[in-house]
Structure formats: structure tokens, C-alpha cells
Amino acid sequence: MNTLGFSFSDLISGYVTSYEESSKIVGIETSDGRQYECKITGNTYARGTQNLGEGWNSADLGKLLKKGQMIFAYGTFYPENKVKFEINYMVFAGEDVNHYRYADEQGWWINQIDQIASSYCKWQFNAPEHPIDYQNYRTVISLTGGKKSEDYLQETDTISRMVYGMACAYMLTGKDMYLDAAEKGTKYLRDKMKFTDTDTGLIYWYHGLKVGKDGEEQKLLVSEFGDDYDCIPAYEQIYALAGPVQTYRLNGDPEIMADTEKTVALFDECFKDNDKGGYYSHIHAVTLSAHEESLGRNKAKKNWNSVGDHAPAYLINLYLATGEEKYKKFLEDTFDTITDHFPDYDESPFVQEKFFDDWSKDQTWGWQQNRAVVGHNLKIAWNLMRFYSEMPKEKYVEIAEKIAALMPDKGYDSQRFGWYDVVERVLGEDEKFHRYAWHDRKAWWQQEQGILAYLILQGHMPEKQEYKKYSDESAAYYNAFFLDNNDGGVYFNVLANGVPYLMGTERYKGSHSMSAYHSTELCFLSTVYIDLMIKKRPLDLFFKPLPNGFKDRTLRVEPDILPKGSIKIIGCEIDGKEYDNFDANALTVQLPKSDTRLKVKVTVATV
């Protein structure tokens, strides 16, 4: 029974161990040390990894089939007298052994974010041919960028996430179209999606705006997404700030700061559990209470999103922009809460993600049950290491390294590379592998978490080769298979073997789950970690302060929370002219008085 007596196609990812020209046999060793013999046929073709916007990248097999070269070999298994594997095509991560385009070519990720941002500007606004106008924004856009002309939805979070991507693209490229998209999107959110409670002064954000066939507008206060239906989820309020706060880092707009402060006050007033700690996941739309019976399965619950997502979505960037102690305290409380309650290693190699009011485990909620989202584990490791640079508590690095040690064996595909989606948190009887909840597909955002987690760990601990190994493998897989070199942007999901999965909502470039966020965040922070922590290359950053922006005219330019004293400013230009009124070590620029906007270019480098 269960005999593998049929041919099937799959991917082998690993490292070349040998190549015989006469027999055309390639030896490949997988990430976990298993050996394969693979045959090149008369129809086998090969390419190098190509970035968005690049043409076909031909591969020189004579140069590349050398011991130690990373290779992706897609082909067919034939179970004959012995199992044979014949290669259909190969993809190479770099142009030599230990060469990885994503890391060794300076500007790889900057070029990628430029291409992604350009695609979303074209899809959403037909820019630059037409002015950017968020009346034309759609949450849902097709694989090729198409969208409905009427009867559509504009979700607050997806606008905010695209705004975040545009702000990041401007900071790395200095292209004014991206700043225009970030600022107009922020204003649109303020004008259309913001609700101010006149009694309390608190601000919260509509789920979205539904526009009918005749152009009539209906504002949706409560979420229409199934997990959060008829509630105000913390998750949506958190991500409503992602784009505006990143835009604030560029321009210092005091209106953005006012909105942000009042939204943070909403978290403290309505979502925070002042007794037992943490933040509730949902509140009632009228009473703003987390304890209403009508919230159903979301009554008085806490989860990863309501506790942990503050940090990556807006809070780290808010602290970088302001340096204010209250936001540092918020971050400390966030990471202390995570390290105190989320680890569950007596039961599972994965963190616990959903909780009742008293922090007891909720393992019956909806789709999650007793399941783990692999990317959330990786996201915790990544963000713990970010804040560790600001506040080096040993428990932060201990949990981050614990996750980094566990995930390759539990949530990683050692046959093909890349990170899985949702798996069962515990093994069943006689089980060796944590079962996939639904499928073995891989989502773009979970690859981001894995790449950033191992990049930042590599930056902090370069002596630990396993961190370089998994950042290389994860980034190589992502760049080989997730980039849509035909229509632009990145794919939502690929199959385990790297083939794009283009069914249902997962075929879209814009949806409730996808906008220009994780793909651009990956480009932005990969650039920061690789250039400033790993390769130690200088990096140019761009800002455009408003005349009335930034308190005391102090521009803070640290791109992410990095190890104290590890980088400094080595140069500054304002409107194309050299400018020297900056504190190199504090990473601040003292802006001159001006009645007009200033374009600031700052070069930072490793000390």
C-alpha cells in the first residue's frame, strides 16, 4: 500500500556536490544534508535569479555547476529500477559559489522596491501619466493590475499599507512620485476613514468605504472580514497607523502626529487590559468594550495581532521618528508581554497565539484551534532582536534564538527552501512532521518574516553560520519564485515547489490581505540590515520635511533600531547642497529655518 509507483514533478533545492559532464549527472545536497543524483537532459534549461524589471538572465552551466553552488532544480521523479530525477530547469541564486545577488549586489532591494512601488502607482492611479488620486484606489486588484470601475470597496488597512510602501520607497529612492502617493494616501485616510469621538477626543478608523454603482458612499465602521465580523478589531486600528507614521518620518506633518497620538490613546483607553496586561483583540462598535456578549467568540480575547503587531506596524517607526520615552515604554511592555505569555515550549515548539482574558490558552477559536502560524513565530524573533538593540534584556535574545533554532526543523521546507504557512502545534501519535492545517503552500509575507529574522540575527551574531544559511536560503527562494517578472509585484502564494498558486483571492495583487506592504517592508529592511549590519556599506536615505514639521526642527534619520553606536551620519545634503549641521552619532539633522519644503539626503554608514 501507498507505493510511490508513479512519476511526479517537484523541486530539489540545495548545493552542488559534483557534476560529471560526460553523464550529465549533478549531485545536490539539500539544506538538511540529504543527497540526490539529478540528470540534465537535452531539454533542460537554466537561468540566474532575475530582479523585477530585469530581462531573462541566462546561466552559464560550465561556470555554475561547481561544488558548493546553491541551486534550485525543478524536475521529474521516475521510480524505475532506482528512483531517477531528471531536471526540467534550474535557477541559480548567484554567479559563483557563495555569491548571492540579493546580498552581494548593492541596490538589489532598492531596485526591487522601486519596481513594486511603480507597479502599484500604475495599477491604482495610472501614474505617472495621470495624477495620483485615491478616489481611484481599489482594495481588490487582479493579477495583472486590473480593477473594477464601480461597486467597489476601499479598506482603510490596505490603503495604509500601500502608503507605508510608498513612504519606504521614497526613503530609499528619493523619487517624488512615491512621496506624493504616501502623502495623498495619508490625507485620504484622514479625510475619509477617520472618526473622531467628540466626547472623548479619541480617534478610531473605519473599516473602509463602500462605493456603489452610482457613486454613493457608505462608510463601514465595523469589520466585514470573517475573523472580525461586526467588531472593531485592534488589528485594523493598528495597521491604520502603519502608512501615516512611516510618512511622518519623511515630512514631520503635525496632523499625522495628532491623529497618531489620539489613536494610541484609543488603544490605552479601550483595548488595554490594565489589570492583567496586554491588549484585547476586539471591542464593540457602540460601547467600545471588549466584554460585550455580542462579540461572540471574540469577547475578552487577546492574540498575537492585538499585542505584538503594534511594534512592526507603527510603534518602532513612531519611536524612531520621535525618540519619546513613552513609546519606548510601550515597546518594552509589548515585548515583555510577548516573552512572558507567548512561549509554550513544554507543549509545543511553536508559541501560543490566542488567549482568554486571564492569559489561559484559547485553543478552540475559529480556524486557529491549536495551530501555529509559522510566520508569527519568525516575526517575534525578528522584532525581539530589533528592540534588543534599544533595550538588551537577555530574555529577548534568548527567545529570539530559541525560535531561530526551532523553526528550521519545524516550519521550514528543507527539501525546497522557504517557510510554510499554518501547521498543527503538536504532533499526533506516530507523527514525525507537524501536519499542515490545509496545504503546504508558502505565503509571501511569511517568507518576509523568515528573511528578516535571520538577517537581523546574522547582523547581531555574524559568527553563527546557521543564521547566514537560513537568510541566504530564504531570500534566494523568495527572489527565485515570488517575483512576478511578467506583470510586476510579487505573488501571494507559491506551491511548495515554487510554482505560483493563482486561485481564488490568492491570485490577486490587492485584496483584504495583500497590498504594497510586506513586499516593500522586506525591501526596505533587507537593505538596512544587509548594508548597515552585514556588508557594512554606506546607505543614502531621503526625507522631505514640511516647514512646520518635526519638533525643534530635529530630523531623526536612523532607519531601524540598530545596535547602539553601530552607525553614524557621514554626509548630508539639503536641496542638493552639502550641509553640516548634524550630529553624526545621534543620527539627527538640525534643519535650517525655511518657509518651503526641504529635500534632505543623508548618508549613513557603519562606524
Image: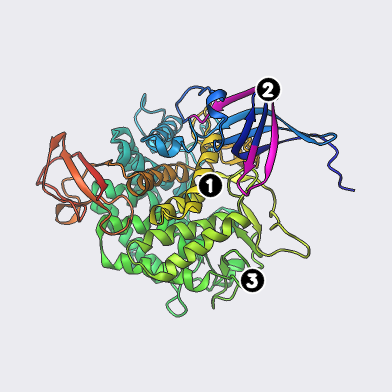
- Residue 289: x percent and y percent? 48, 71
Q: Report the mark closest to the observer, 1 or 2.
A: 2
Point out the stretch of residues depicted in magenta. 28-50
Q: How many marks?
A: 3
Q: Give the answer, above or below, for where 305 lies relative to 116.
A: below
Residue at 57% x, 31% y is: 91
User: Which of disc 3 and disc 1 is earlier in sequence?
Assistant: 3
For the stretch drawn in magenta, the main secondary structure is: strand
Q: Residues within 10 Å of mark 2 (few under 14, many from 20)?
A: few
- Helix, strand or loop under label 2: loop
What kind of element bears circle 3?
Answer: loop
Q: Which sits in the foreground, 263 or 584?
A: 584
Q: Earlier in the sequence, mark 2 or mark 3?
A: 2
Can you identify the residue that label 3 sits on?
A: 347
Circle 1 is placed at which residue position?
Answer: 447
Q: Is residue 587 above or below residue 49?
A: below
